[in-house]
Amino acid sequence: MTENGEQNNAPQESEPVADRNERNPKRIGQLIVLVVLGWELCKLVARRAVAKAFAGGAAVSGETAAEYPETAAERPKTAADCPETATEHFGSAENTGRAADRNLDPQRDTTTHQQWGMLLVVCASAIALAGGVGFLLIYWTGGNNLLLGVTLAVSFGGLGSALVLYSHWLMSRKEATEPREEMPSGTVEREDFAENFQESEEDIHRRSLLKWIAVPTAGMIAAMVVSLFRSLGRPPDPSLFSAVWTRGQRLMTLDGRPVNVNALELGSTTIVFPEDSIGDEKAQTVVVRVNEQFLQLPKERANWAPMGYVAYSRVCTHAGCDVGLFEKTTNLLMCPCHQSTFDVLKAAQPTSGPAARPLPQLPLYADADGNLRAGGGFSEPPGPGFWGMP
Amino acid sequence: MSGRPGGHFAQWLDRRLHLAKFVKKAMNHVFPDHWSFMLGEVALYSFIILVITGTFLAMFYNSSSAQVTYHGSYRALDGVKMSAAYESVMHLSFDVPAGLLIRQMHHWAALIFIAAILVHLARIFFTAAYRRPREINWLIGVTLLLFAFGNGFFGYSIAGDLLSGAGLRVAYAILLSVPVVGPWLTFLFLGGTVPASVTLPRFYSFHIFLVPAVISILLAFHLGIIWRQFHTNYPGPRRTDETIVGSRLWPSYAAKSLGLCFFVFALVAMLGGLVQIDPIWVYGPYDPIASTPGAQPDWYFGWIEGAMRLFPGINLHLGPYLIPEVFFPAVLLPALVFAALYVYPFVEEFICFDREYHNVLRLPYQQPINTSIGCGFFVFLAVLFVAGGDDVIAVATGGSVVTIRLILRLLVFVAPPVAAVLIYMLCARARRRHTASHPPAPPEDVVVQEETTDSSNEEVRTHCDWKEKCDW
């Protein structure tokens, strides 16, 4: 066929212009037709060869069944199946080769199938390679993280695809059946073990001595290990129960300025610390100025709020977050972590949310200069609850 | 080795290790073909990614909480005071080539690790794969989940940003709330207050050494046991309690599994490159007086967060002692959940008097009670998870947090039983339909089976007859 083509072509054109033929569109078209025809011929020949090699109708399934003959022979009981299923091992459509799986004729299409498989695997590998090269290029030219991630993903994705395609198209997908091991050891094995154990038991003279050594030693080692934990820290100390506020400490903002009684408008807040420990996390306190006549503090706290200035611990009594939000209209302090709310007017009693205990209050008084000072420590231990909390 | 059995290296090895028999057996090991058996592998491969990326990160991380002033390439935080830990994470994110990619891959891999474990656990549960003889692996798996949670938290906490600091304070409150030993634990392990300078080095040590070591050892046992026992099989032809059906390790299963490994890598790399996660430069360094509205933990702690938000403010006073409100949702609830997970196989075994070996799975509809318990439990966790974002929902819907909380408090009790009953009815219906369309084999068939082999009758009963001894 190819020879015929050449013969047809030769008389039409003379030898010297053969070089220019490639630029002639008509010649290129003929060339393409030739290549396609040649390719088809090759496929035809290959198919014939395969058909000869696998002579017989169920070539593929026959081959797969021969692969693991011992399975069928060794395990007669595996043949006993559900009534509705085929008892033949490798014969049914579900577990023969890929060709049967894809409704192809196993005899004719195996080679095509494998060619497709190879093509796909090569393509996937090429993508993986391209991704890898891209990664290297990007890394060595600045290393944009986004592109690095994408190229890495392309590379690994290509590799993964190549492997999966390989196993799907080019590997046998026959199903293997194996016996499981019997779970409890057999009687013989167990008796053998018991006998052996008995023998070695006789080799341990003075078994009780071993116990006398083992028990105290184990206890001693445990004690040593547990003792080492002591190095990690100290036992709970009184700092658990209080913050560093003491009577007379001026209220200072984080940038170190005292809070004057004229500093705040009604309904505004500020965060303060004791003047000796500015920034102390546990001592952080929120000062709110509210209208004095609406305050409903308990009687013993009547003079804790000069000119409507009330101060509460800013560490939530629920889980220790900062009670960072204040709603002016409802006079509620709110913790953004779990949405507990505390009523500023009613000694910071919890009004909703998961908190159970009020925010500890800090007694205040104004000194001669009009600066606010602490009248003592918090009314209760600040922060989240614990076992020994009063 | 398999390609060239006579290869020089193979022979060299065999002369020293006597491998031929062992490797032959290993190559022929049978693994069932079903996508749901890949879930555990996804977890395994994300753990490998975690170890690789984590090793890279550990070369740059500094766990010191000493205060430094930032002068790196992220200009927006120039001159800001921060902990050395936070600065080292900023440095590796912005000044180390590919550092940000590796860090984001690490975080994504951690999320996928835990997600894969949970889905794997769900698959085991809903197909009853935890039954004898696989109870040990169930126990190990639940323990692995516990350690994965722990390490996720440690990793989240050591970045030193605002959110991890806030998370640490909540964790401190939770640990402190434990009756009797709580204050001791916080003083010994967290240095008394949070964030104490001792916390980060300790968490770092747990995060990169102790917990990964435990996870590796447990994983080795987990895999060793599943190798010894083989996987289970879904019900189907030739799948019996005495056989394992699937593809051989070499070459088919190895190629597929390695391919999956690369896919997990590709997914993590894609997410790490394209999807921003934990942008600590947006949160800023930890600042003890900055409040954090809208702060959420990583997703797998969402249910505990939600429980903490829903649980009412109840203090339990025992004489002079106090059990604070945080204890119940944040310590007791997770403890009960994990206790329930641990004992479930044994409870089922006890209730059903089930002493058989089960290597064929039950499909969800074949075990309505089991499935409905699992679904009810899942809905319970889902409601809690939603509650973990009640403020976000309130902002998004314009409703009030109080109303949403009330609804969720009702739902957390109502929804699980409703879901369970619904699922039970669906399963029972599916089972009836299946029985109707697949009538049990006529008795004479069984007789024929009995005549052929002794064990066949047994098999017919175990995986063809839906009415097992206990359809729990």
Image (cartoon, coloured by chain):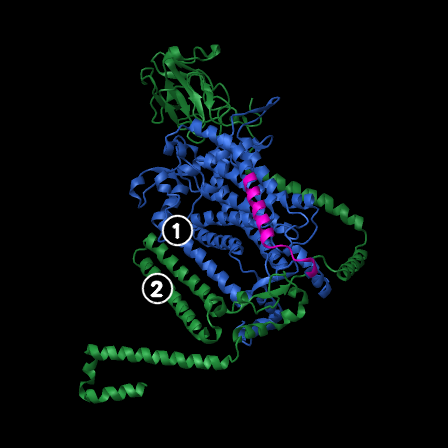
Chain colours: A green, B blue
Q: Quadrant of residue A228?
A: top right
**Separation of residues labelled 1 and 2 (CA atoms):** 20 Å
Disc 1: CA contacts within 10 A as few (<14), some (14-19) or many (>=20): many
- The overriding secondary structure of the stretch rendered in magenta is helix
Which quarter shows the C terminus of chain A?
A: top right
Of the pair A19 and B51, the residue shown nearer to us: A19
Q: Which mark is residue B271?
A: 1
Q: Position of residue A351 (x, y in %)?
A: 46, 21
| Rendering coords of residue B469 (x, y %) | 68, 49
Is A330 placed above or below B258 here? above
Mark 1 belongs to which amino acid? Leu
Of residues B390 and B296, the one nearer the viewer is B390
Q: Chain of mark 2?
A: A
B424 in magenta: yes
User: Over which residues does the magenta segment extend?
Assistant: B421-444
Q: Label 2 near label 1: C-beta < 8 Å?
A: no
Number of numbered labels in the structure image: 2
Tell me residue B199's x, y (percent): 49, 38
Q: Residue at x 35, y 16 (%)?
A: A371
Residue drawn at 32 percent across, 43 percent down? B71
- Considering only vertical position in the picture, is B452 above or below B315? below
Is residue A195 depicted above or below B336 in this figure?
below
Residue positioned 52% across, 54% down in the render: B36
SS at circle 2: helix
Depth check: A86 or A365 in front?
A: A86
Residue A280 visible (yes or no): no
Residue A115 shown left or right of residue A35 in the figure = right
Any mark on residue B142, and which?
A: none
Q: Where is residue B176 shown, x and y percent of the image?
A: 54, 31
Residue at numbered disc 2: A130
Residue A217 appears anywhere in the view: yes
